[in-house]
Image (tube, rainbow, N blue to C red):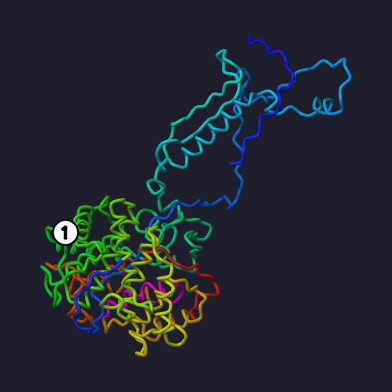
Amino acid sequence: MLSTPQPSPPPPPPPVAPAPLGIAGRSTGGTSTPPPVAAPGPASLPPASTTKWRGETKGQQRSPAPTPPVAGQPAGQAVAPARSSVAAPTTTQSDDEEADLRRPLKVADFAPSWLISLVIHLLFLVLLALFVTPAGEGISRVLLTLGQSEVEAPADLAEFTISEETVLADPTDSMTLDALVDIDALEMSELTLDSVTPEFAEVDMGIGDIELPAMPMVGGRSGSMRKTLLAIYGGTQETEDAVELGLRWLRKQQKGDGSWSLTGRYDDGATSENAVAATSMALLAFLGAGYTHQSGEHQEVVGKAIRWLVKQQDRDGFFAREGRSHQQSYSQAQATIAICELYAMTQDSWLRDKAQLALKYAEAAQADRGGWRYQPREPGDTSVTGWYVMALESGRSAGLEVDQSTFYKIREFLDSVQYDNGSQYSYQPYGPPTAPMTAEGLLCRQYLGWQRGEEALGRGVSKISIDWGYDRDDPNFYYWYYATQVLHHYGGSSWRIWNEEMREHLPSIQVKSGAEAGSWAPQRDRWGSSGGRLYTTCFAIYCLEVYYRHMPLYKPTADEESPR
């Protein structure tokens, strides 16, 4: 039995602590206007945010953890605060002294100030450790016990223990598609945006009563999230098979040094070489399907490609030293997208400075009126500008630094090439609006902040989906690539009509046998002769990856299902 300590007068309260670039010149070739031999889109990994799962409302307070029992007290028995009877004083006391005796006892009355300070500092260290410990490693549970231990020891000592019984796991390792949405219970044709409606607010996206984890722009490319997005937005087994067959064709074409060729080791190559463009486009196809240099079936392919690409970058951040002058700007933007996306997907530190340098080049090359063209600071065109917009968005979503004034100037450029208050776009100011430039201009507007309810966006979507449509008899992979993205983000009936046509047609025209199995022939495409077979194959793959390539931007609602 431990002896009961004799009561002593309350100690005085503890003292209060005091309040505590220039760009190197490039070649100056002609200014003809063939559209790009180029490829798509953005990426990043922002800090993880709190996720609300089914059955728990946002802001809900969790029940406090039960107080650990005091040593020597039976488990589950309530413990009353220790009270000691004090004999009534025989001398007359002042009112202040009498009130002091009547007030409830506090921790400071029976714990010395050094112990309180110790506990506060220990708690601070624990919180600090929790903040700096990577997710899935290190501290998993902290238990702080105050009181007497079963072994006789000074009563004012605190026992501080850290338990490592469990280790946090990556949620995607154990999270299956069935846990998010019962795909087996729904026919693929029935699972549309009408039956499962996504909600999107900044980076949070929920589907019905299911809250999906907060994701960066490239967060849907693998695991259960990829399967869920495929089901919601209308992907099929045929689209996935076509993507994998296309990637296997690309893998066969990779050269020993990790690069690809536009002119090719294959039939129907491009009319001129540009290895940076070819490598960037092929790399983006692998990244879009979730493969990186750190994981996946094509890990070695991606690793060789990114090592080769990084070697091409000079001290200004410029990659594209070869190829025709009008192609260099396209390939520079594509290389920037690729390196930013890979950094966003992996947070591999050796890529960060390379990606940041490429973004700085993009900022310095922007024209005064906000666009980009063939030479640094040359007055822009919509085609080249669209690629740089996606490069900057890739960098921003990856957590890299992008000057906000760059985006303000882009809006100024888009205003100069818009028609019908922004529903259509031309190649350069005062030119006629076209289908490819309208799709590219609208995608830029979506990423630069236009909401789904913007009237001009609704009219532009109608123009793309109804007036121009998906024309099998007039292949234009460049237009298909941009229109597919715009309509996917917009959703509703316009997307369903376009997607039902695209997801059936593109796999049907893919080469299925022979040396070029997995590729798409370039002969009938409007720009196929200049881009070649690798160009058409990469753009077809991007279209078929659209379901998960970039996270959706908008939250469709019932009254917005039909475009204006």
Residue drawn where x is 34% and y is 80% of the image: 382
Q: Can residue 293 be seen in this view?
A: yes
Image location of residue 483, percent across then percent down: 36, 76
| Left or right side of 153 for 38 | left
Image location of residue 66, percent across then percent down: 61, 32
Report the magenta residues as a range.
Answer: 476-497
Q: Is residue 491 magenta?
A: yes
Query: Vertical placement of 404 versus 112: above or below?
Result: below
How crowded is the residue under tag 1: few (<14 C-alpha within 10 Å), some, or many (20+)? some
Residue drawn where x is 39% and y is 55% of the image: 45
**For the stretch drawn in magenta, what is the main secondary structure?**
helix
Image location of residue 111, percent across then percent down: 65, 24
Q: Name the residue under label 1.
A: 258
Mark 1 secondary-structure assignment: loop
Identify the amino acid type marked 1. Gly
Q: Is residue 219 magenta?
A: no
Query: Vertical placement of 121 versus 202: above or below?
Result: above
Q: Is residue 81 visible?
A: no
Pick the quarter of the image with the N terminus: top right
